[in-house]
Each structure stands twice: as C-alpha cells, then as structure tokens.
Amino acid sequence: MYEVHKRHGEGVDRAITALFDTETLRALRRPSGIPADSLPALLGARGLGASGCPQQQEEALEIVPADAEHVFRRQGQNWTLKYRGGKPLIMKHTKGLNYISFLLRHAGEELTAFALIDLDEGREVGQHSLSTSFSIDEETLSSVRSKMQELQADLAQATEYCDFTEADRIRAQIEELQDYVSREAGLGGRARREPPDRKKARSSVYNAITRAIRAVRKEHPAFADYLKLQIQTGFFLQYRDTNTHWVL
C-alpha cells in the first residue's frame, strides 16, 4: 500500500481531498509525522492499517516493574510470581493462586474460607462478626482458643506499656471470641459436628492453596517454604508477614 501511495500518492490525495474539506482532514487522528491529508493518515484515523483492514486491538496488560522484589500478579490466564528479586515465574491460573493473592492483599487480616470463595467468585464479602449459623467443630475451637491465648499475651504487653487504647481494642476482640465459643460450642464448651457445607468450603480452599504451593515448589522451593510458613490455614486464614511489599 505504501509503495502504491509512493507512486500514485498525489493523485490519490487529490481524490480523497475532493471528498473531505481541509478542516475535517486535519481534525482526524493520525500517526505522528504523516501529513494530515495523506492516505495513511486517513486509514489510521479510521482505525485501519496500511492494508485498509481494521487493526486488531490486543488486551493491555499491566507491566510488572523490572526492579520489583516481590511480585504476585495475575496477567490474563497466567500469573507472574517473583520472590526476593529472583527470576520471575510464569504459572497458569488456578484458584489456589487466586486465594493466596487475596491473602497477600489483606496481609495481617484473618479471612474465612467463605470470604476467600466469595472474593474468588466476584461477590462482595459482608462485614460480619464471628457469629455464624454453623456449629463449631474441634479444629475451629482449637484455632479460636489459640487466638485467644495470643491476644491475652498482646493484652499483657499493651497493659505493661500503658497503651490503654490498644488494650481496649484487644480486650474487645477477646470478649468477642469468648462470646463466640460460648454461643457456638456445645454443653461444657465441647465441639459439635461440623456441617458438610462448611467443611467442604474449608477443605476446598485448603486443598487449592496446598496445590498452588506445591506447584511453586517445583520451580522455587525457597518461595514455597516461605508461603507455607507465612500462610495460616484452618478456621482463620491469614498471611502473617505484614512487612513485605508485594506488587499485586
């Protein structure tokens, strides 16, 4: 097309100019450096290539910064993973990688399996308390009691340093957990049988995350060890490391 325009450009330009006035031609978007009233400019203004065919637009993907130390970003149907400035890993999309991404995005926060499933399926997660319509099971009861012990230690430290605001916040969390156990546990604080749908949700999320970490291990064992160490599973799911910045 450019060769044709080179040989016959003047005649073609005159024919096109006869169809459009000068102001219209100059108002059209055109490639930089090409005269406004030339044939390539007209084709470009109409979204056409040099051949006169519509130009195919590709999906724009966010560019991962080259100097990023830690990356966990989905790009189309693949994920780009990078740990401690090492060689980037390209992995196919899985639910497990998506769950891990949500945990990294909410570092330090505790999410339930139901919350991760909602996020994965594009549903908004409601701001609910720990109260649920399900009975508590032994694993959940153990997790809650362990969390209460951690909070008791935090409360003692906050009290020692006279941080009364933090102490009140921690005390409120402890009371909420105590109320939850009293309300959901059976007689004498014993665990009840876990409903099938709740068990299925927790198992599904746990298995998906485990498979994702196993896949990472094949390419980067140290990264897999880090994820396994920092991601807590069970009733509460949490990415513990709040000091590492991730490009997500």
Image (tube, rainbow, N blue to C red):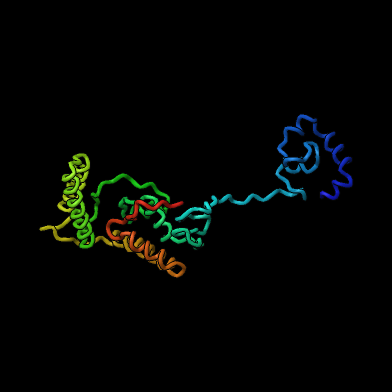
Q: Viewed as shown, does residue 247 lie left or right of 226? A: right
Q: In the picture shown, does residue 86 fall above or below 26? A: below
Whether residue 135 is visible here, answered yes or no, is: no
Q: In the picture shown, does residue 215 fall above or below 149? A: below
Residue located farthest toward the front when viewing the structure as drawn: 161
In the image, 234 versus 204, the foreground residue is 234
In the image, 88 versus 118, the foreground residue is 88
In the image, 225 versus 206, the foreground residue is 225
Residue drawn at point x = 18 percent, y = 57 percent: 145
Whether residue 166 is visible here, answered yes or no, is: yes
Residue 234 figure quarter: bottom left
Residue drawn at point x = 17 percent, y = 47 percent: 175
Residue located farthest toward the left when viewing the structure as drawn: 188
Residue drawn at point x = 85 percent, y = 46 percent: 5
Instruction: Measuring from the top left, give residue 139's x and y in whole percent.
Output: 23, 62
Instruction: Measuring from the top left, give residue 205's x and y in whole percent.
Output: 36, 61
The total of numbered circles placed on residues is 0
Instruction: Measuring from the top left, give residue 242's x and y in whole percent.
Output: 34, 51
Instruction: Measuring from the top left, give residue 118's x and y in whole percent.
Output: 38, 52
Residue drawn at point x = 20 percent, y = 62 percent: 138
Q: Viewed as shown, does residue 120 lie left or right of 56? A: left
Q: In the picture shown, does residue 235 fall above or below 127? A: below
In the image, 181 versus 90, the foreground residue is 90
Q: Viewed as shown, does residue 211 lie left or right of 43? A: left
